[in-house]
């Protein structure tokens, strides 16, 4: 990896020097390069880069999707929203081979710019590739490998790119686009739906749909800027070797919805048994609410601390929050019965109101959330019933 980044640095310096040449735009050729989705979760929307062919024959890929898992506190900073990506330039043959070898199709669209616009674009690329400029604050939907490219072209031309997305994307929100590309990865989408709030649920424009690089294969032929077509000629396609792309569909019995229904069924059986014998199975509460509390801590971090613009507001914080730990911490302590009872009453009412008012929140929920919320409400209702029934029995006996 270190040798790879060292090689990138040499290519970077060479590229910057060549871009600075006054006449480089006269015969330079710049293209959009779109890669089809891969099997890793960060590859499901595909990838976009630029290809720059220079007058002296150098053929380079300019890639805004470089990140380093080994950088200090990468996971913490990623969750907090302080994810730094970088742009790098390296031989296009290396870029192409890495995707073709993985079985992913690569589609190249030459950009139709005049000499002055090409020169301006190359100058912007050169500036971005400088050591003090090449790192940028990545945003999953607003500032990524795809949106960066269009921003550069728009800055070079001084106009906005207008594109038309396929008809099946009409009315899409960012979340709808994610669900389309993540349909074979339901647990990944479950996590996204849990972590991201209503900020990604508004209908997005045609321009905003370009955040998903793979959509550009259909959108670029319709793209226009300053009254002219943005891309020239027919695209060049490089077929992937062997099989590649996303995994097959997850079997339904292993999906989040199925697992949620299993949990709901188990909670119902437990509640019925507890009510019949007038005794709370506290171990069930401990397991269920401990998991909810852990999820609640993560959600609270995303809502109140993370700088991700899409994580707040998130109305699921009413369901999953650190207060869930009251139950596992106190359910076995006799002196805390009233505290747990108060929590269960508040929890039941809060979840009931959340369900009733959810259509007005503007947030789209994963379908697998509802059986889990129902299970939570059933556990609270059965605890409340058993405690009150026990108190009533003691009063009668007294």
Image (cartoon, helix red, strand yellow):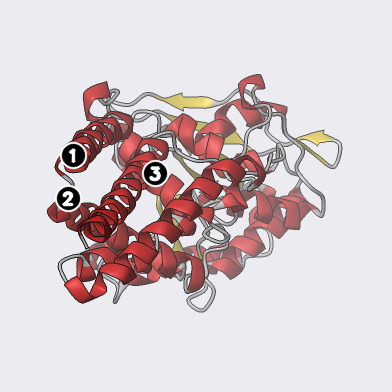
Q: Residue furthest right?
A: 227
Q: What is the crowding at mark 3: few (fewer than 14 residues within 10 Å), some, or many (at least 20)?
A: many
Q: Of residues 142 and 226, which is closer to you in this image? A: 142
Q: Residue at x 68, y 26 (%)?
A: 170
Q: Residue at x 86, y 36 (%)?
A: 227
Give the distance between the C-alpha atoms of the residues marked 3 and 1, in whole angstroms: 16 Å
Mark found first going from the N terminus, 3 or 1? 1
Q: Are marks 1 and 2 in contact (CB under 8 Å)?
A: yes
Image side of residue 125 versus residue 10, left or right: right
Give the distance between the C-alpha atoms of the residues marked 1 and 2, in whole angstroms: 8 Å
User: In what element is the residue under mark 1?
Assistant: helix
Q: Can I make out residue 85 in this image? A: no
Q: Point out residue 54 in the picture as x, y percentages from the top left corner.
A: 54, 51
Q: Point out residue 18 in the picture as x, y percentages from the top left corner.
A: 54, 63
Q: What is the crowding at mark 2: few (fewer than 14 residues within 10 Å), some, or many (at least 20)?
A: some
In this view, the mark in front (1 or 2): 1
Q: Point out residue 28 in the picture as x, y percentages from the top left corner.
A: 61, 48
Mark found first going from the N terminus, 1 or 2? 1
Q: Point out residue 306 in the picture as x, y percentages from the top left corner.
A: 47, 70
Q: Which residue is tagged 1?
A: 270
Q: Which residue is tagged 3?
A: 373
Q: Which residue is tagged 2?
A: 284
Residue 324, quarter of picture: bottom left
In this view, the mark in front (3 or 2): 2
User: In what element is the residue under mark 2?
Assistant: helix
Q: Residue at x 48, y 76 (%)?
A: 131
Q: Can I make out residue 81 in this image? A: yes
Q: Quarter of the image containing the C terminus?
A: bottom left
């Amino acid at each position: 990896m270190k040798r790879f980044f060292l090689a990138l640095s040499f290519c970077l310096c060479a590229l910057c020097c060549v871009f600075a040449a006054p006449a480089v735009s006269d015969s330079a050729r710049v293209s959009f390069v779109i890669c089809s989705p891969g099997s890793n979760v960060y590859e499901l929307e595909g990838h976009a880069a630029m290809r720059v062919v220079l007058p002296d024959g150098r053929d380079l890929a300019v890639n805004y999707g470089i990140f380093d898992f080994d950088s200090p506190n990468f996971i913490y900073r990623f969750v907090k929203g302080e994810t730094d990506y970088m742009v790098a330039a390296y031989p296009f043959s290396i870029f192409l081979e890495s995707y073709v070898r993985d079985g992913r199709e690569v589609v190249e669209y030459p950009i139709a710019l005049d000499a002055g616009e090409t020169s301006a674009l190359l100058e912007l690329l050169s500036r971005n590739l400088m050591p003090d400029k090449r790192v940028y604050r990545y945003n999953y939907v607003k500032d990524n490998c795809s949106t960066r490219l269009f921003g550069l072209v728009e800055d070079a031309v001084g106009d906005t790119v207008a594109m038309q997305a396929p008809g099946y994307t009409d009315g899409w929100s960012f979340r709808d686009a994610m669900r389309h590309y993540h349909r074979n990865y339901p647990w990944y989408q479950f996590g996204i739906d849990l972590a991201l709030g209503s900020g990604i649920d508004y209908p997005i424009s045609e321009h905003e749909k370009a955040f998903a690089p793979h959509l550009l294969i259909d959108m670029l032929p319709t793209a226009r800027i300053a009254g002219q077509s943005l891309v020239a000629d027919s695209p060049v396609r490089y077929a992937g070797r062997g099989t590649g792309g996303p995994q097959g569909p997850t079997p339904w019995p292993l999906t989040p919805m199925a697992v949620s229904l299993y949990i709901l069924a188990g909670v119902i059986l437990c509640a019925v048994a507890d009510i019949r014998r007038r005794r709370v199975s506290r171990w069930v509460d401990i397991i269920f609410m401990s998991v909810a509390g852990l999820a609640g801590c993560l959600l609270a971090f995303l809502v109140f601390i993370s700088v991700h613009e899409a994580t707040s507001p998130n109305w699921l914080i009413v369901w999953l929050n650190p207060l869930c730990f009251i139950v596992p911490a106190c359910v076995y302590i006799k002196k805390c019965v009233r505290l747990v009872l108060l929590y269960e009453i508040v929890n039941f009412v809060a979840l009931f109101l959340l369900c009733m008012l959810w259509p007005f929140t503007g947030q789209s929920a994963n379908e697998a959330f509802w059986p889990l919320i129902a299970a939570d409400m059933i556990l609270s209702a059965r605890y409340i019933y058993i405690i009150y029934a026990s108190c009533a029995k003691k009063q009668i006996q007294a």
